[in-house]
Amino acid sequence: MSAAAAVSTAGYLARRAAQKEKVRILYRRALKDTLNWAVHRHLFYRDASDLRERFEANKHVEDLDTIDRMIADAEASYNKWRHPDPYIVPWAPGGSKFTRNPTPPAGIEIIYDYGREDND
């Protein structure tokens, strides 16, 4: 194997690995976003199955440029149909309970044994 062929093969493998990672991340984001649209589990399972079929239908594509184009189209579609008000776990950043009880500012002391102080 010549040096040019080795570089070409390494470049191909690196690009293919990057594409697989992009597809994996896109699938996970789309699957999580499906939960925002389908509140009930029986609806979610059907939508998740349909999403999986859409990804599996293109599993056989080998041309790198075609794969890049398909990834770009899928990301554009995801951004177009993304939920406008996604569900956020209450205690996560952006959730309804996040920093509900923030830490007290410096200089404020909390006395945990209030009413039971020593009366010396």
Image: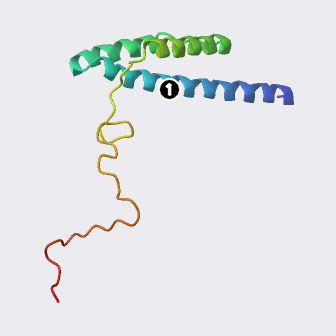
Residue at disc 1, secondary structure = helix
Q: How many numbered marks are there?
A: 1
Q: Is residue 95 visible?
A: yes
Front-most of 96 and 35?
A: 96
Residue 86 is situated, as x and y percent measured from the top left of the image, at 36, 25
Q: Residue 9: image x %, image y %?
A: 74, 26
**Relative horizontal placement of residue 113, taking residue 57 as reference (left or right):** left
Look at 47% across and 12% down and name the residue there: 80
Query: Could you tell me the amino acid type at mark 1?
Result: Arg
- Identify the colour scheme used: rainbow
Q: Which residue is mark 1?
A: 24
The answer to which quarter of the image holds residue 95 is: top left
Quarter of the image for the N terminus: give it: top right
Mark 1 crowdedness (10 Å alpha carbons): few <14, some 14-19, many ≥20: few
Residue 62 at least partly seen = no
13 horizontally vs 72: left or right: right
At 36% from the left and 11% from the top, the residue drawn is: 50
In terms of depth relative to the viewer, which is nearer, 79 or 72? 79
**Residue positioned 63% across, 10% down in the render:** 66
Taking the view exactly as shown, the residue that stands out farthest to the bottom is 120
The picture quadrant where one finds residue 87 is top left
At 22% from the left and 69% from the top, the residue drawn is 112
Q: How far across and down, in percent of the image, does residue 103 sit?
A: 35, 56
Res 33 → quadrant: top left
Q: Nearer the viewer, residue 9 or 18?
A: 18
Looking at the image, is 11 positioned above or below residue 84? Answer: below
Above or below, comparing residue 31 to residue 111 in the picture? above
> How far across and down, in percent of the image, does residue 92 sit?
36, 40
Task: State the quadrant of the C terminus.
Answer: bottom left
